[in-house]
Image (cartoon, rainbow, N blue to C red):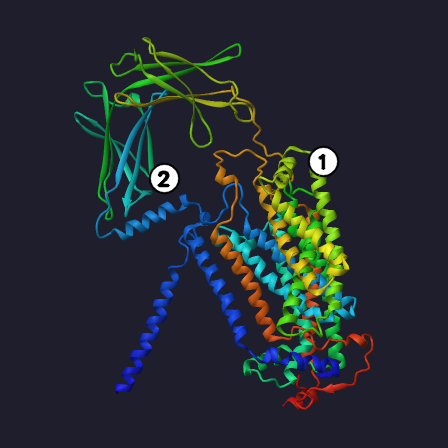
Amino acid sequence: MKAIKTRGASTLNIRSIIIYAGLMMLLFIPVDMFAQADSTQKEAPAAEAAVAEEESSLIGPSLDFITVQKANNTIDLKASMQAKVKGSFYKLSLLKVSFVLVTETGDIPLGFVITDKYGKAVLNVKADSLKTDAEGKLNFKAVFAGNKAMDPAEGELSIKRARLELTPVKEDSLLTVQLKLVDLGTGTETPIPETALGIFVARLINPMKVGEGTTDADGAASVEIPNNLPGDAKGNITLIARLDENDVYGNLEASVIQPWGLKVSDTLKELPRALWSPHPPLWMVITFTILMVAVWGHYIVIVVQLFRLRKEEPHTAIATKN
Amino acid sequence: MELNSYQQEAFNYQRPNIEKFGKSNLLWIIFFLLWIVVGGYALYLQIAHGHVVTGMRDNVVWGLFIVNFIFFIGLSYAGAIISGLLHLFKVPWGKPIIRLSQMMTITSVIVGPIFILLCVGRFDRLHHLFIYPRLQSPMTWDVLAILTYFVGSALFLYMALIKDFAVYRDAKMNVPKWKQKLYTALALGYRGAASQKRHLIISQNLLAIIIIPLSIMVSSILSWIFGMTLRPGWHSTIFGPYFVLGALYSGCGVLIVAMWAYRKMYKLEHYFTDKIFLNLGYFMMVLAAAYGYFTFSEYFTSWFGSAKWDADVINKLFSLQEYGWWTLFANLFGILVPIAIVAIPATRKVNWITLASFAMVVALWVKRYLIIVPTLETPALPMQDTRMEYVKYSATLPEWALTFAGIASFLLLFTLISKLVTVVPVSELEEPLHQHNHNHEPVVVNKEAIQTV
């Protein structure tokens, strides 16, 4: 009995050592060995994994809430959700965010949006249909009700109605945009003076700032636009005027498309021969294939000859050997 | 396996070298292993801290590692070309040195590419070379060419060894059982039967024919990694033949030095004769002259053309404040000294030729450095945030440690192979006085036939 016990214990020890050694070897695998995929694709699963891990203690998400008043009298209500789990921030996708207009008589639901893969939810509402408070302000609330993994979260905002207008003006070769910023909170249009506005042009990822102006007593400003901006195939560029993060009005935006850019063809031209071209030249493929087949073909013939060498070992010699 | 008396004598003479493993062998191996351990520590530092421990930076992205890679791969090509030519043309005096040149081929083709692995920063992306190859990239050509060449040279060495393995197998040597089994397995049942001889000769000839153009092509492809770029000092039409010639030349030097070392260690004066040294010396002299001609053409056309970037590189190479002394050393010992030593009758001696060869090998290593580093220190495009320490390369201790570890690995592999097989091939040997005369009576290898040397 004693012997059996000892053997069992030693087997266990060897097994443990092998498992332990295996685990230790795992430590030598570079952590980023498989980090080749687009990291943005990983956010949702990562967030889900994080959610699963944190089931025992609920995650406290944060909800950032902003509004953007558009020139067409609509308002974008934008909520962005993220959470910090184990020191890293995760964008929270697939969560329901409800938007509410807060009035003196009670909350009026405006609708809900499910957050996208970047954790963003945007609801566009018609401003004229919304009821302002006594001060002429609109009070909004964005609410995430929470779920079994996360605490609820909400954000509140109060903005005064305003409108930013953008009018493109072309005089000879001089390109300008005329801006007008008016307060709509009181029901009449009141100019907003001494306010800095930025002019941007839409680019592939983020708008690029091309100028800025400050409104005068009439709430008007004029900003010159460069005439060498690359546009699309027709030379169109999207000009955007913005008032950012104003304490009273929040964010305001107006945009217009003008053929003021340089025409940049969007059709792919035939690329010149290059190291990064999709395919090597045909002659190169043919030459390469011939060379490789010729050399490796010879190798195969030689290896076959070597096999035949063994096959043709004289029997007498084998007998002698044996 | 039957041998004639001269071959038998050669085998008996060398037999103790593969049967015994002396203290001096062990000391050499420990010495090489120590260097490899030091190199291993340097590699650990490089992996732990990144390539910042090397002298390579934004501008000079290739340093000692690539110099060593080209140097070793060059030796390998030279070994293949020399052994292929000696085999194909059945040069009688060259038979004793075929094995050495094949050993040089295989050891350097193993050691050389390791330096590429040391040079790349992302080991985890190494397999991308195979799963995302771009056929239009010289890098892809080089990877495929070296792989193909490695297989070819390994086969070439092996086929030349089969007959000798059969001799070792039949000689019932005083070696460990595993070694005896290894000889038996590697001999592939070769007994010298007529059909076996035919198969072996066909294979050997085929491969000898393939290996020579293959070496030339692979060496040219290596040069095209440089030549295909538009960089000053690299974008040159003569780079292909220049590299082939440089490889052959330096390989010839290493072969002479290796011959000298084995001649001293194993007392092989009877086989590595003065005549072989002299013949290789003449070959080296011719190569030196051709190499000198190529070098002059390269520098002269660049200098005369005076294109801005080319002129910058040439000025760097010849300015004594920069690489002038290196250039002088590379050309003096790489071209003029070997020619002079072989040309002057008084110095046309084994030791002098070996000394010249050794100096030439070092000079050609320096020449590789001069091809790579000064060009990279002359960027064709201005770079943002360029700092002097990024522009100027100087090799660091980890790089030197890994370089010496590579040399130690090369020598270690050489030592290990020479403990497994005879340095002078036995079964193909011809008596110098009776070359072309095959009248030796064959004798069967057995204990009685073995003579004490």
Where is residue B184? Give x, y as percent.
Answer: 62, 81
The answer to whether residue B4 of the structure is visible from this angle is no
Please identify the quadrant where the C terminus of chain B is shown. Answer: bottom right
Q: How dense is the environment of label 2, judged by Cα within 10 Å: few (below 14), some, or many (20 and up)? A: some
Between the C-alphas of marks 1 and 2, the distance is 61 Å
Where is residue B68? Give x, y as percent.
Answer: 58, 54
Q: Residue furthest left?
A: A105
Residue, x 51% and y 22% (percent of image)?
A: A229
Q: Residue furthest top?
A: A217
Q: Amino acid at mark 1?
A: Phe
Where is residue B6? Give x, y as percent.
Answer: 74, 81
Look at mark 2 in the image and give the residue it sits on. Answer: A118
Label 1, secondary structure: give it. helix
Please identify the quadrant where the N terminus of chain B is shown. Answer: bottom right
The chain identifier of the residue carrying mark 1 reads B
Q: Nearer the viewer, residue A149 or B265?
A: B265
Q: Are marks 1 and 2 on the same chain?
A: no
Where is residue A239? Give x, y as percent.
Answer: 44, 21
Q: Does A8 sit above or below residue B90?
A: below
Residue, x 65% and y 37% (percent of image)?
A: B310
Look at mark 1 in the image and give the residue it sits on. Answer: B304
Q: How dense is the environment of label 1, judged by Cα within 10 Å: few (below 14), some, or many (20 and up)? A: few
Label 2, secondary structure: give it. loop
